[in-house]
Image (tube, rainbow, N blue to C red):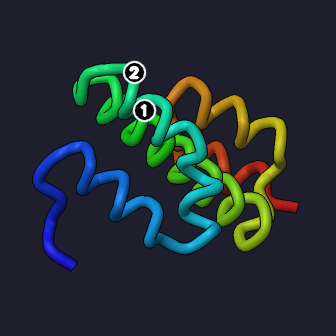
Amino acid sequence: MDSPKGYKSVLKYYNSSSQEVRDFYQHLPKLIESFSFDIVISYLFSRLENAKYKIIYGGLVKIHRCESNLTKLMLKIGRILVRIFKKSLN
């Protein structure tokens, strides 16, 4: 599919996406209709950032067996230090 050219194309592209994508970006249609693209793009990047942290958290806790509260704290303050997580391994 070609890149969307305007808000109607973005909505069409969104509506043709999988249910999982539509659920993840559930507020997108109303934002497109109500706000400028700057706000919409901020929302999209915010959701992507949220997903990135969930993936990192899941990998650190489930695969590397890091302590969950410490992992959340380190992700919250934005510091992932290998030596701290190595100490927290179970």
Q: Residue at x 67, y 60 (%)?
A: 60
**Which of 61/87 is in front?**
61
Residue under label 2: 34
Q: Residue at x 54, y 63 (%)?
A: 21
Residue kind at label 1, given as amino acid type: Tyr
Q: Position of residue 35 (x, y in %)?
A: 34, 20
- Quadrant of the image occupied by residue 39: top left
Tell me which numbered mark, 1 or 2, is placed earlier along the sequence: 2
Q: Position of residue 23 (x, y in %)?
A: 64, 55
Report whether 31 appears left or right of 26.
left
**What separation in Å lies between label 1 and label 2 (alpha carbons)?**
13 Å
Q: Residues within 10 Å of mark 1 (few under 14, many from 20)?
A: some
Q: Quadrant of the C terminus?
A: bottom right
Report whether 79 appears left or right of 84.
left
- Quadrant of the image occupied by residue 26: top right
Q: Nearer the viewer, mark 1 or mark 2?
A: 2
Q: Going by the picture, which residue comes out furthest to the bottom?
A: 1
In this picture, is 10 found above or below 73? below
Q: Residue at x 36, y 33 (%)?
A: 32
Q: How many marks?
A: 2
Residue kind at label 2, given as amino acid type: Ser
Residue under label 1: 43
Report whether 55 appears left or right of 15.
right
Report whether 55 appears left or right of 67.
left
**Which of 55/1 is in front?**
1
**Dot 1 lies on which element?**
helix
In this picture, is 38 found above or below 85? above
**Which of 69/49 is in front?**
49
In this picture, is 21 found above or below 75? below
Q: Residues within 10 Å of mark 2 (few under 14, many from 20)?
A: few
Q: Quadrant of the N terminus?
A: bottom left
